[in-house]
Amino acid sequence: MTSAVSLHDVRKDFGSLTALSDVTLEIEDNEFFTLLGPSGCGKTTLLRMIAGFEGATAGTIRLFGDEIEHLPPNKRPVNTVFQNYAIFPHMNVAENIGFSLRMLGWTKLEIQTRVDEMVEMVKLGALVDRKPSQISGGQQQRVALARAMAPRPKVLLLDEPLSALDLKLRQEMRTELKRLQRDTGITFIFVTHDQEEALSMSDRIAVMSDGKVQQIGTPFEIYEHPNNRFIADFIGETNMLPSIIDTVEGFNLVCQLEGGQTLDALANCDNIPGATGVLSLRPERLSITKTEPTGKILKGELGDRVYLGTDTQFIVKLSAELNLKVRMQNSFFQGANYKTGDTVFVTIADGAARFLVD
Amino acid sequence: MAAGTGSGSTVSAIFSPVRFWLLLPSWVVIGFFLLVPVLLMLTYSFLTKEFRGGVIWEFSLASYDQFLFDRGLFGDEAPVIKWTYINIFIRSILQAFGATIFCLLIGFPTAYFIATRPIQSRTIWLFLITVPYWVNLLIRTVSMKFLIRDSGPLNELLLYIGLIDAPLHVINTNFAVQLGLFYSYLPFMVLPIYASVERYNFTFSEVASDLYASKVTILWEVILPVVKPGIIAGSILVFVPSLGAFLAPDLLGGAKTFMIGSLIEDQFKGNAGNWPFGAAASMILLSLVLVVLMFYVRAQNKDQT
Ligand SMILES: Nc1ncnc2c1ncn2[C@@H]1O[C@H](COP(=O)(O)OP(=O)(O)OP(=O)(O)O)[C@@H](O)[C@H]1O
Ligand SMILES: [Mg+2]
């Protein structure tokens, strides 16, 4: 089975600036694939190369096994939902959605039927006669989506389509997009810098930074088994504790933290004693108690707390300059019994401590 | 327009003294330089002519009558429609229309070219466009006459290359007039189009291309409709002064291509010396222009709803 989109050693230079390098990706058919990374890491550039707006400086891009380098954008069976929607201002909603079908030479009747179908799908019923200036941002986003999906592309590229919406609408649209993708079976390549969005919607995620793909994996793999410091830091919240490997026993490491405490961690692959790095500990995989439990523990002094609605985040001082964030669910934890200055024990869930080399 | 229609303004805001004083200078200028001359013209067109220029203060419809009807040599026959002046008007409209098309054909690509240069070099291009216009219009038109005459450099060049065997006869034709008008008013076309193309969001072109439109289709179905206001503004700015122009028709067109501008000029400065008739012709010209503008406003309003 050939991949929907495959990139091999793709590189893109803008003059002396290298926007992308060594990008190798296999995106499967029917997959919801996300490119995730901070602003300026090259996500839009990568999307534009797949759509055909930019040529690759080196490397090959294939679509269902065919080289597409020589094809202009209007010859690629790929459609894009642009970052700023760019709904044609002189056409109404229906004309916008039907534009590509007219270009492809569909008959009036076919266009009408398909536009109705799309309008139904993205729930724009009453708005078909409106001009873009007369509809809201969320509605424009739906028009852009319907317009790009109308010609039944094999691959749909979405460039931060939700970033202009407010939180509530954004959460609604996440579910909506996911549903559309599952119902239509179109391969989605979705660009975002919002990790929550990426984790909740994607089948697989490619995390990018500085024009390079750092890690490719399912949301679970990316979150639980980050390859390096950048990913552990970028995806979700984590504690990064500088440490040195004491001993290596099979898959188990014993790491020494600043201030002398030691902690067991999962070995990555080629860890050797004496190596320096950080221990990554997710705050929600930690818990605090007043009585000393058995197992992997750290000892510290309770500091400030931040109330977050469902959770409370506590700061535990392990040593003078080593602080640990711990997140406790309010419904299971009697935070009121814990006072600032109390000595507490931090329990680390199995497999939660990961050692990442510098 | 923006000044007059403070959107959602309450009654108290409309009558607020600050607003009044701020608007006063504009009203004075508009009143003094626009309304008064037009009213003066309107009045004169209904007066009786004096023999050598000037007017007699006596109400008369003679000027409009003279424009439209022929009543025989002694003015006692039944009126028949007179085509002399109407034809001049029709010819003027066609000439102005031709010049506008010319300006559009050359002006749009020029404006598009400039608007798509890197920001730093745009100013230089715009500057270059305006350089010829530092020279007086009369001198430019006269030099155009030298350029295109039968033994002028243009013909010499074409003959030399061997593109033509005999000199092209351009001077004293309608084409020469259109060429002259085109040369006179080209920047009025380029600048508004430039302004709207510069504001055009080129993502629209990319979207269209992504949605299977060819380059030509993108131009016709996306770029042109979106920058239409600039095109219309430029067309009006070229069409209106072309309609009333008299330098280019006089110098480049010869006697056969008499236009409204020359007709009116003749009534005030030239041999005819008939002020009320000149005023009446001006009023008719003004009404024509107003009709054109009204169509434009109507089209704009329809677009926005
Ligand atoms: N046409 C261009 N010319 C020169 N440099 C460019 C061009 N397009 C992008 N770049 C540069 O390439 C890098 C990647 O840009 P890109 O737009 O792909 O980032 P992005 O990941 O989409 O960021 P964002 O999340 O802010 O949209 C940036 O450093 C940008 O400045
Ligand atoms: Mg981007």
Image (cartoon, coloured by chain):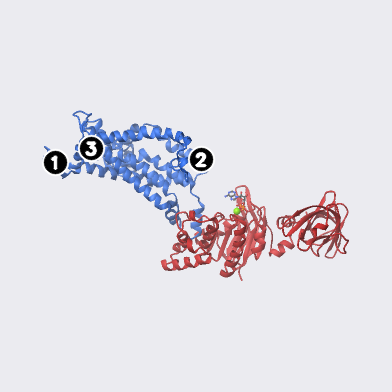
For marks 1 and 2, the one nearer the N-term is 1
Q: Mark 2 and ligand 1: say if the CB distance to the nearest ligand atom is below 8 Å.
A: no
Q: As shown in the figure, which amino acid type bears the numbered disc 1? A: Arg
Q: Is residue B269 left or right of residue A159?
A: left
* Residue at image coords 58%, 63%: A62
Mark 2 → mark 3, Cα distance in angstroms: 44 Å
Q: Chain of mark 1?
A: B
Q: Give the quadrant of the N terminus of chain A.
A: bottom right
Q: Position of residue A123 (x, y in %)?
A: 52, 64
**Residue under circle 1?**
B71
**Residue under circle 2?**
B121
Q: Quadrant of residue B283?
A: top left
Q: Position of residue A102 (x, y in %)?
A: 44, 63
**Residue under circle 3?**
B255
Q: Chain of mark 3?
A: B
Which hue belongs to chain B? blue
Mark 1 → mark 2, Cα distance in angstroms: 62 Å
Question: The residue tagged with tag 2: helix, strand or loop?
Answer: helix
Q: As shown in the figure, which amino acid type bears the numbered disc 3? A: Ala
Question: The residue tagged with tag 3: helix, strand or loop?
Answer: helix
For marks 1 and 3, the one nearer the N-term is 1
Q: Do the numbered discs 2 and 3 sit on residues whose CB atoms are within 8 Å?
A: no
Q: Nearer the viewer, mark 1 or mark 2?
A: 1
